[in-house]
Amino acid sequence: MSTKKGAALDIGPTVMKVVHGLLLKHGIAERLQSVVATAKPFRVLGLDINTNTTGYVVLNERGRLADAGHVSTKHLSSESQILDIGVDIASTLQRLHSTSETLPWVVGIEDFLKTYAGGRFHTKGLFQLAQLNGLVSYSCYTTFGARPQHVHPTTARALFRLAKPKDTNKQRKDAIKHIVLDFALAMEPALVRPEAPASFKYDVADAYVIALFTYWRHIADLALAADAAWTQSVTAATNLALAKPLARKAAAAPELDLQAHVASLLRAHVEQHIKDTLPPRAFAPSTY
């Protein structure tokens, strides 16, 4: 968010209702449809980085599959060959870039620290993964000219309402992997080859969710471009409709950047609109 530290978003029910109504009045659905339909070509890369296998997915400007696969580095030691693993992944990144090198790229990487769970990684393994994540993030930055966005996997899944059923058998800790894979294949049946090992499928499916989340985040960026007439119109309407609460907030926190605060309010509600209106999962839920 662009608000200054300590300036929490005002998302009380009254403000939520006002901003929601303004977005509907200004045609947020039509705005997003127009952005998707008229977007100039670009590519989105999603990565699920691991010392054994790294899944990758590339989407085009319509959010459809352009490329997908995995980089297997199981033959390399994570203890002594982290640089070699990074080089193998970087080679794939360069190949992907070469297919669309004249286009702008947006990069999303699954945040490894926030996937940490007690007992899942020993300390050495966690540091190795941190090293690899840093190497690949730097490679993305230098290869695609884009600063990678590190995405919490739970945040990405939440956009598509992907979660384990509450009554899931506790022994099936991998249930979410199956749910994510089902979703990814329902959206893009050609995402992975049927004969591919299950572990590779899961890595690619995770990368797909990161890529699709990053895609919609980028669409929100385009929809809310500061120099767009639509953004200026809805911002002006928001400032007018929330004049009194904004004035009170400014009085209580003189250091608050009101323009950034309003932009953050609009951003949060546009992202919520995207979540609320995305097509439902195109498959019947399975039981795990």
Image: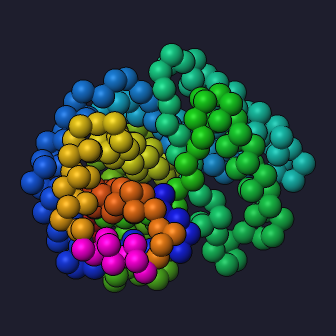
The quadrant where residue 188 appears:
top left
- Answer left or right for 190 relative to 103: left
Asked whether the viewer can see residue 275, the reply is no
The quadrant where residue 232 appears:
top left
Q: Residue at x 61, y 22 (%)?
A: 95
Residue 230: where, in percent of width, then height?
22, 41
Q: Residue at x 41, y 27 (%)?
A: 42
Asked if residue 220 is positioned above or below residue 265 in the image, the reply reads above
Image color mode: rainbow
- Answer left or right for 263 relative to 54: left
For the residue pair 26 and 187, the one nearer the viewer reads as: 26
Q: Quadrant of the C terminus?
A: bottom left
Residue 177: where, in percent of width, then height?
46, 61
Main secondary-structure element of the magenta-colored stretch: helix
Residue 201: where, in percent of width, then height?
49, 47
Q: Residue furthest right?
A: 80
Query: Where are the magenta residues, as a range?
Result: 244-252
Q: Residue furthest left?
A: 25
Asked if residue 159 is positioned above or below residue 174 in the image, the reply reads above
For the residue pair 182 and 104, the one nearer the viewer reads as: 104
Asked if residue 75 is positioned above or below residue 288 in the image, the reply reads above
- Answer left or right for 252 relative to 247: right
Residue 261 among magenta residues: no
Asked whether the viewer can see residue 117, the reply is yes
For the residue pair 157 and 14, the one nearer the viewer reads as: 14
Residue 51: where, in percent of width, then height?
72, 50
Q: Residue at x 37, y 23 (%)?
A: 41
Q: Residue at x 26, y 52 (%)?
A: 235
